Image: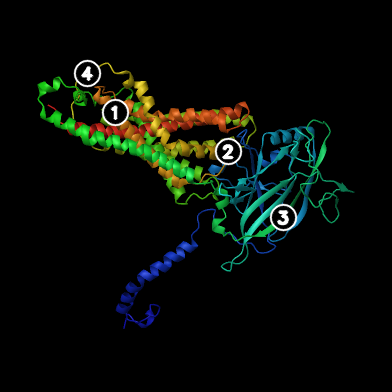
Amino acid sequence: EIVRQPCCSLACLTDEQQIVCMVRCFPASLLLFTVALVEAFYLPGVAPREYADGERVDIKVNKLSSTKTQLPYDYYSLPFCQPGEVTNAVENLGEVLHGSVIKNSPYDIFMSKSDFKVLCRKELAFKSAQLLAQRIREDYRVHLIMDNLPAATKMIREMPNGKTITMYDRGYPLGFIGSADRPGSTAGVPYVYNHLRFVIKFHKDVAFTGSRIVGFEVEPLSVKHQYKGTFTTDMSSLNLLTVPVGPDLPPQPVKWKQRESFEVIFTYDVKWEHSDIKWASRWDLYLYMGDDQIHWFSIINSLAIVLLLTGIVAMIMMRTLRRDFNRYNEQDKEDLQEESGWKLVHADVFRPPPAPILLCASIGTGAQLLAMSATSILCAMLGFLSPANRGGLLTATILVFMLMGVPAGYLSSNTYKSLKGTEWKKATITTALLYPGVMALIFFVLNFFIWSQGSSGAVPFGTMVALLLMWFGISVPLVFVGAFFGFKAKLKDPPTRTNDIPRQIPKQAWYMVGIFNVLMGGILPFGAIFIELFFMMTSVWLQRFYYVFGFLALVLLILVITCAEISIVLCYFQLCNEDYNWWWRSFLTSGSSGLYLFAYSIMYFFTQLDIIGFVPTLLYFVYMLVFAMLFFVITGSIGFVSCYKFVWAIYSAIKVD
């Protein structure tokens, strides 16, 4: 009877029957609750909004950016039309560090209402004209935002198979330089795009009321407007002679050489287009990375390197080491004296290296950076860091770095303890302050250069104070927490005793010398990532979207395996040559890939970029040097930890008198 009772009629049942019925209905209730929760849950900044016909749609202005200068500027730093009251939007930490300055605009746009409007007339003085001409020559692009979508210019690309695809390029160019290819223009003269055609795509569905914006395209035009009578922004009273606006009209030059002021009239029109693109897919054109075959080629290339190294490591482990174990464990002590090999250095292999505090601090910082990278990539891959949440990735990365102070302190202190270190306070402080302090000092000095250019990319004083508070209030204490548990953790005794007198290291062959060996060790880790590195650098320096985090996660995994295996192989060869100074060598072997990364950045600068000016060039090389240093610390830490485990394992497997 209870089974036949409907679950919603509990009032007619006894207490015992109600309990049984609720137990039977729990899975269905849980499923319905989960579905309702999923339907009601949206990631920050990505909740859809429906607009009714005639409802106002706001356009916000963002920064001006250029791939030639890498210096962003405030939109209103140029003589554009302004609203009656300019208000700043609330920006997160990532947006501030990116140099974004989001403000309201004078554009009046209403849902489904196509219109042509005159924005304003500007009298450009000599200095304003010079500044505008300079920004046009520097290839600056203007960035606008509508319904959390960035403005984009539409590009049609023809694929090798003959098909055409639509792609978006963020923002629109500020102007162009006249040439023979542009009708009506004079070669070498800058022209400003003073008319914007907004093509706004919207989607309607029976599932919701109103319209959702799914595309925001801008078609810029340069038009030298002419009118009769008195100027006014009221189209009913203004006798504008240059309508309808089209590319056949004479363009608007920027007369930056003449001392007299000249007028520029800014106009815009709005065009609404229905689209079948759903709101959830509106970012696809922005995030299109081209043919993904090159990414698969990168993965296959990296896997080939990993398989090669895995085969070498497997041969060492299964054949060479097994043979060594059998020989060392079976032969007499007298016979051993005539042998050569890694067992002969068993009394020196765990001798503490020079500068142990610096080594432990480097390992701890490397673990912190690796954990930060893996966590950020995983969150982005799962969609938690949507591109609609501007600056979210950078904000999350900084926050995760601060929170990863625990593994940094733990690994650093635990390694320092295994080296019989006693200055634990100095080791912990060095881990917490050394590398972050160097980066903070570099960015602080660079900030003065950016500030001297009047760029919005200069970090405000309040933001710098907030970053320092996060560093000393979150990261440093967490490093001490990790160090506390690292020093408290019990360590096993080393598998071999260390002699008081160091063993003399025999003369090494030229190919086993430290510098050559270290440089050879960095080639394969860099080779595993250099193709994906190209796309990452293109995203940063050519200001493209990068959103193939699934590929990036695979590349990171392959990088970790490659660093571990190449370090183990070279460490084994080093020990076989009776050289027991493996501590720093294991760190530098895989870490030298950072040197190749910086060398690649130099080649990338001269082959892919068109950066002009001293400050932009300085910014590029210093930023890439910092990135190479961080990459060096990450890969070096992976190599050290792998060799530490390897050395401990092989010396634990032999009998030593």
Q: Which mark is residue 235?
A: none
The crowd level at tag 4 (other Cα within 10 Å; few <14, some 14-19, many 20+) is some
Q: CA distance from mark 1 to mark 2?
A: 40 Å
Q: CA distance from mark 1 to mark 3?
A: 66 Å
Q: Nearer the viewer, residue 77 or 10?
A: 77
Mark 1 element type: helix
Mark 2 element type: loop
Task: Answer whether labels 2 and 3 touch (C-beta < 8 Å).
Answer: no
In the image, residue 601 above or below residue 396: above
Outermost residue on the front side: it is: 161
Q: Which residue is disc 3 drawn over?
A: 270
Residue 20, percent across and down? Answer: 31, 75
Q: Nearer the viewer, residue 635 or 161?
A: 161
Residue 223, percent across and down? Answer: 78, 45
Q: Which residue is disc 1 drawn over?
A: 571
Q: Which residue is disc 2 drawn over?
A: 542
Q: Which residue is disc 4 drawn over?
A: 503
Which of discs 4 and 1 lies nearer the camera? The answer is: 1
For this view, does 494 lie left or right of residue 251?
Answer: left
Q: Residue 648 falls in which quadrant of the image?
A: top left
